[in-house]
Amino acid sequence: MTTLTRQDLNFGQVVADILCEFLEVAIHLILYVREVYPSGIFQKRKKYNVPVQMSCHPELNQYIQDTLHCVKPLIEKNDAEKVVVVIMDKEHHPVERFVFEISQPPLLSISSDTLLSHVEQLLRAFILKISVCDAVLNNNPPGCSFAVLVHTRDAATRNMEKVQVIKDFPWIVADEQEVHMQEPRLIPLKTMTSDLVKMQLYVEERAQKT
Amino acid sequence: MDELYLDNIDEFVNDHNKIVTYKWLSLTLGVHVNTAKQMLYHYLDYKRKESSAQLHATYLVSGKFVDNGQASHRVSVVREDQLEDFKSKMSLIVSVHVYSVQKALLKDSCPLYSVDYDAVKDNLKNCSRYSAIRCASAVPMSSVELRQVRETQRAPTTETENKKSDMNGDASSSKPSTKPPKGIMGMFTNKAPPKNQDKEEIKSDQKENAPVADAPKSKPTGKANMMMNFFASQATRDKTVKAVGAAQSSTTEQECLSSHPEDKQEAAKVEPQKETKKDSRSKNKRTEDSDSEEEKMEKKKRRRIKKPDPDSSDEDVIPDSPQQMVTREPSPSPKKETESVSQPHQGHSKTETRKTRKVLKSRIFVDDEGCMVTEKGYESESYSENEDDLQATKQAPKDPVPSNISASSKEDEKKSHKKTSANTNKGTKQASIMGFFHKK
């Protein structure tokens, strides 16, 4: 088999694969760390060579997978600006927003041989930051739920409405109340810069959670 | 030791919101692990006195532990709030020290490992430099020794790698290596015939000497490919026609007789088809004897075509020269085959009466200008069943296309069945094979 040359690689796809993999790990970990679900449904798994917590609930896992499956085409085309994990209280008012802000350099290139292991190291740092984020956040009220929001660039939203990547798994425009937060407080968690992708993670936290 | 390290640790823990383990601290600051443990303890002590913001710590506790009457030595990392509780369960405590300090309340041990992971990875070569555990007899290898070890390791690795790459090649065609697909084979023969040869040899369980003999052969084979292909395709056509002819025969006697040849024909039909696409491969399938001999024959003949060899037997020389001519216009050969072969069958089924039949014969003579001329024409001749075999063998040399093979087959008549079937591939053997069977 011929080896793939750099030109053969579809960088958009590579970036999307890497990011979606990471987002899946991150979402599971956020749900675990922020105690949205009881810790009993989580199990240790290995990712990026370090242990992470992952839910064992099949429906929850399926939901997360489906969601990311739909996000992937957006990232491939560099249409996704932010992927947000929103934690909402009982009244569906957001209390925390974990914002993954993604931007891809206009010209993708591989300049380092250790690129992928370097990216892995950066993503590991993200994971580590998420797992200790409860030190900088206030406790959430009981009975929280979560949702995943995607902020798209330009008119990508309209395409999303037209083409359902997964049947019967449509995306809808988020409610205003889910997006807007009263008196948010910004807590930066981590940034990464690599040749493939730039990403920063910050948390918007509602000042008065209860 | 000055108190500056307290500020250091404070920065890591509070400003960076890091989990500071003693191992990470020792690697980061370049201090002995025991020193790092003391620093963490002092820091914790200092902060507790300050009674500032909440700090969480984990401790490493090791000692004797009795569980269900079974004593064991246990090493555990426990959270601060469980420390006293855990200690009380231990029957004998060997050591207790601070493992990590962090702001976050750890829910599990995962982050502790993650923290050390990159620190250890960055200092992989000397991650035990500050360790308290020493082994005097563990001496690092010198660079020379290291190189030697690597070289010895490399030898087997490269081999496996080669195999792997082969596998990959096959995998790309989505077929297992046991039965390599034609397309891939074609690619290999075009690109690198020698490699292909080797691979094949490994797969087909040939005699031990096969690889040796085959390796040098691979090149001639490649050159001969064009010729071989031509013959093979020709043979295929001939055979189809013959098969039809045989099927036409109606008597029972004929049927039982022909059933055997027909089988052969079937097999032969399949084989040449394969050969057209991957001749070099099928060659390897044959037994070594036939292979090499035929190879030689092939070469010899080709040489003869260019320059008749006086040393070789008459039989060989005469048929060869027409062959060259015929290769230029191969179309008549199938026709002729049909007639000559199908008719004998019919005759065979009847009694031994003598009959006459028309046969396309080619004559070779030297004309007045000294040129070799081949003339073809239908001649009527009488024959009986007994003559059939003779006829077949006789005809074969005259038959323009397959002449050289039939000649060779004659020579090899005593050879095994396999050999004959190998000849089949070249096309002529049909006549000779039939003769072979009839005799018996």
Image (cartoon, rainbow, N blue to C red):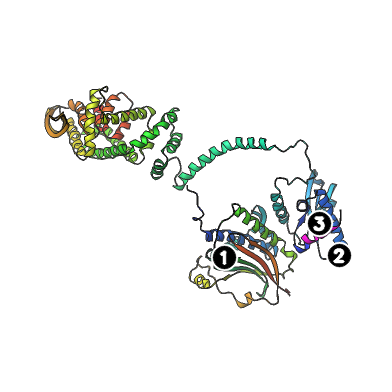
Answer above or below: position of B342 versus A86: above
Q: Which residue shows up at 51% across the image and 40% down it?
A: B162
Task: Find residue B308 and report its image quarter.
Answer: top left
Chain holding disc 2: B
- What's the magenta region? B1-12
Residue B81 spot, x, y in % from top left:
82, 58
Q: For the C terminus of chain B, give its image quadrant.
A: top left
Q: Which residue is mark 1?
A: A67
Q: Which residue is mark 3?
A: B82
Task: Find residue A186 and report its image quarter.
Answer: bottom right
Q: How many residues crowd around disc 3 within 10 Å: few (fewer than 14), some, or many (20 or more)?
A: few
Which type of secondary structure does the marked residue at label 2 adopt? loop
Q: Which residue is mark 2?
A: B51
For badge 2, the amino acid type reads Ser
Is residue A61 rendered to the left or right of residue B255? right
Dot placed on the residue nearer the N-terminal end, 3 or 2: 2
Q: Main secondary structure of the magenta part?
A: helix
Q: How many residues crowd around disc 1 within 10 Å: few (fewer than 14), some, or many (20 or more)?
A: many
For badge 1, the amino acid type reads Thr
Give me the C-alpha separation between circle 1 and circle 3. 39 Å
Q: Which residue shows up at 73% across the image and 59% down it?
A: B107
